[in-house]
Image (cartoon, rainbow, N blue to C red):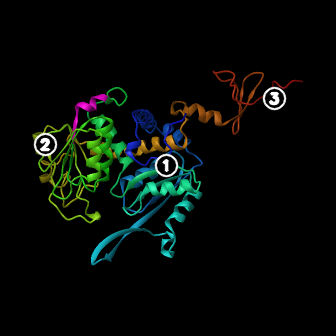
Amino acid sequence: MDDRLKHILSSRQFTLGFLINLYKDTVLIVELLKTREGRELLTHVLRGYVIGEIFWQESSRTYHSSASAAARLGAQIIPERGVKKIKIKNGKKVARWELIMSSAVKDAWLEDEVKAWASFYDLLILRTPDDIEINYLKNVLADGGYDIPLINAGDGTREHPTQTLNDWFSIMYGLGLDPECDWSSLSTKSIVFLNDCKNGRTIHSLAWLLGVRFKMALGFVAPNGLEIPDSLREELKREGCSFSESRELMPADVFYDTRNQLEYGGRKRKGISVDKQIADKYGVKIVLHPFPRSKKGNELPIHLIDKPETWNDSLDKDPRAMYFYQMKIGMPIKMALLKYLLNPYLDLKRLKEEKLIRGIKNQCAGCNRIEYHELGWTDSPPKCGYIQTLSHIFCPECQPR
C-alpha cells in the first residue's frame, strides 16, 4: 500500500519516515546546487510540469523560495498575488485580501475559481487568508474529481507546514543532531515560543510537531491577549504534551521568536526582544524567527553595518542565530517537496545516468555502441555494456549483410 502524502496541508501529516526521506533528498539537492553541472541536472527533475502559485496574502520568503524551487527543477511556475483591501464592517476597519486577476470582481464563486486552476496546473501552491480554509478547497476539488496536489503555503492564522519543515531542519542542524540517527534526542530538549502565540500559524504548526511527534518540552511566553488558541491548548493536553504558559521568560535550548501580527486585527502590545544578553541569561543554544522581523517591535534586534550602536545587542553575527539558515534552507526543502509530490520515484543519485539514458535513441545489438538522438553513434560501447531497457538494432557497421 502506498502511504505517500497526496497533499501538504498540515504538520500533523509529517511522520518520522517522511521527514527523514525529505531530509535525504534535501541534502542531495544542496550538494547538486553547488555546481553548474548539478544545477543543470536538477532542471530535468520536473521538466514539462506547470505549477500555479496563488497567494492572497503578501509574502517574500515563501513566495520567492517556492517560485525559485520550481524553476530550479525545470518546472514553469505561474504566480498570482493578491492585495489587501480595508473595508468598514460594523464601524470597524477590517482587512480583506483579494486576488487582482480573480473573477471574484465579477461575483464569481471561489469554488469555480479553484476548479479552473486545477484544470490548468499540475500542482497548486496556495497561501490563503483566514476566511478561506485550504482544507475546504481540497474537499471542493476532491468532490469535483480533480486530482492534483495542493501545498499549504500559509493558511490564515491556522497553519504553515512548509515553514515547519524549515524550522525542524534548522533545529536539528543548529543543535548538531542528525535527523536520521538523533531524532529521539529532541525529547530531552526544550523550546520556548515568544510573543504572538495567538496568530502565529508557524507556532501552531511547529509546536504540534515538536510536542506530539517528538515529545519536546514546550513553553509559550506571550503578552496578555496573544496566548495560544484554546484549540491548540486542548490538543496539546489531549496528547499528553509537556508545555507551560507564562508572561516571563524561561530557560530553553531553543527560542522561537515572532512578531506581533497586527494584520489580523490585533492591538499593539509590548513583546519580548531577544538580544545577546537575553540569550546568555537563559542558556539558549539557538534562536529562530520565521520572519519578517518588525522594525518597531524590535523583537529581534538587527545588525546594521553602518550603525555600530546596533552591534552589541544583535544576534545576527552570533553562531546561535539560526534564522538566516532557516531562511536559506527553505528553497532546497521546497525543491525536495515538489519532487516528492510530482516525481516521487526519481532517485537523485542516479539523476545524471537517467538524463543520459533519456538522450539515447538505440543500442547496437552487435557491438553495444550507443546511438544518441543528437550525436548519433558513439565510437565505443559504454562501460556498463548491454542496457536492457533500450531498444536494440544494428548499427551501420554491424548491419547483417
What's the magenta bit mostly, secondary-structure-wise?
Answer: helix
Q: CA distance from mark 3 to mark 1?
A: 42 Å
According to the image, label 2 marks what residue? 250
Q: Nearer the viewer, mark 1 or mark 2?
A: 2
* Range shown magenta: 184-191
Image vertical order of residue 174 relative to residue 316, above or below:
above
User: If you read the primary sequence from the N terminus, does the residue marked by circle 1 or circle 2 appear first?
Assistant: 1
Q: CA distance from mark 3 to mark 2?
A: 78 Å
- In the image, 318 versus 94, the foreground residue is 94
> Residue flagged by tag 2: what amino acid is it?
Met
Residue 185 in magenta? yes
Measuring 49% from the left and 37% from the top, which residue is drawn there? Answer: 38
Q: Which mark is residue 70?
A: 1
Q: Secondary structure at mark 3?
A: loop
User: If you read the primary sequence from the N terminus, does the residue marked by circle 3 or circle 2 appear first?
Assistant: 2
According to the image, label 3 marks what residue? 396
User: If you read the primary sequence from the N terminus, does the residue marked by circle 3 or circle 1 appear first?
Assistant: 1
